[in-house]
C-alpha cells in the first residue's frame, strides 16, 4: 500500500505536467493561430503563411507531439513513485 502523501505528490507532479503541456498547446493554437496570425503570415512555411499553418495544422501537430511527451513523462513518473504496471 502506498502512503497518502506519496499519492498526493504523484498527482501534484502529474497536474504540473498537464498545466505546462496544455499551456504550450494553448499558446500554439490560440496565440499563434489566432492572436498573432497576421504577424506570422509574413513568414512562409512550406510555401504557406506561417499564421495559416498554425491555424490549420500547427495546433494538431503540436497536440500529437505533446501527447507523446506526456506519455514519456508519465511513464517516468509512474516508475519514480512505483505505481507502474508490473
Image (cartoon, helix red, strand yellow):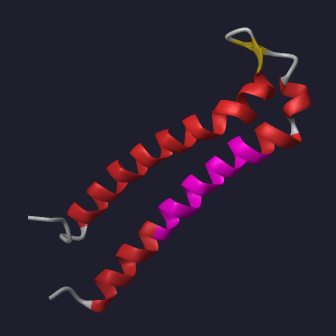
Residue at the left extreme? 86
Q: Is residue 12 left or right of residue 34?
A: left
What's the residue at 34%, 58% (across, down)? 74
| Quarter occupied by residue 58 | top right
- Residue 85, x across and y down, in percent: 14, 65
What's the residue at 38%, 78% (across, down)? 9
* 41 in magenta: no
- Residue 69, x across and y down, in percent: 42, 45
| Quarter of the image with the N terminus in it | bottom left
- Residue 38, x across and y down, in percent: 91, 29
What's the residue at 58%, 63% (across, down)? 19
| Quarter of the image with the C terminus in it | bottom left
Q: Is residue 38 left or right of residue 85?
A: right
Residue at the right extreme? 38
| Quarter occupied by residue 81 | bottom left
| Count of labels in the image | 0
Q: Is residue 46 left or right of residue 68?
A: right
Q: Is residue 56 above or below residue 50?
A: below
| Quarter occupied by residue 55 | top right
- Residue 63, x across and y down, in percent: 55, 44
Give the dominant element type of the magenta stretch: helix, strand or loop.
helix
Query: Considering depth in this image, is 9 or 58 the residue closer to the camera?
Result: 58
Q: Is residue 75 above or below residue 9?
A: above
Q: Is residue 21 above or below residue 54?
A: below
Q: Is residue 36 above or below residue 71?
A: above
Residue at the front extreme? 56
What's the residue at 64%, 55% (across, down)? 23
* 27 in magenta: yes
**Which contiguous range is marked in magenta?**
15-30
Q: Is residue 86 left or right of residue 57?
A: left
Amino acid at each position: 500500500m502506498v502512503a497518502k502523501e506519496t499519492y498526493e505528490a504523484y498527482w501534484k507532479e502529474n497536474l504540473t505536467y498537464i498545466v505546462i503541456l496544455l499551456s504550450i498547446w494553448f499558446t500554439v493554437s490560440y496565440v499563434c493561430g489566432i492572436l498573432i496570425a497576421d504577424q506570422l503570415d509574413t513568414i512562409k512555411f512550406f510555401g504557406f503563411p506561417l499564421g495559416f499553418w498554425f491555424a490549420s495544422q500547427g495546433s494538431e501537430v503540436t497536440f500529437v507531439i505533446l501527447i507523446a511527451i506526456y506519455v514519456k513523462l508519465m511513464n517516468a513518473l509512474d516508475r519514480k513513485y512505483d505505481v507502474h504496471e508490473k
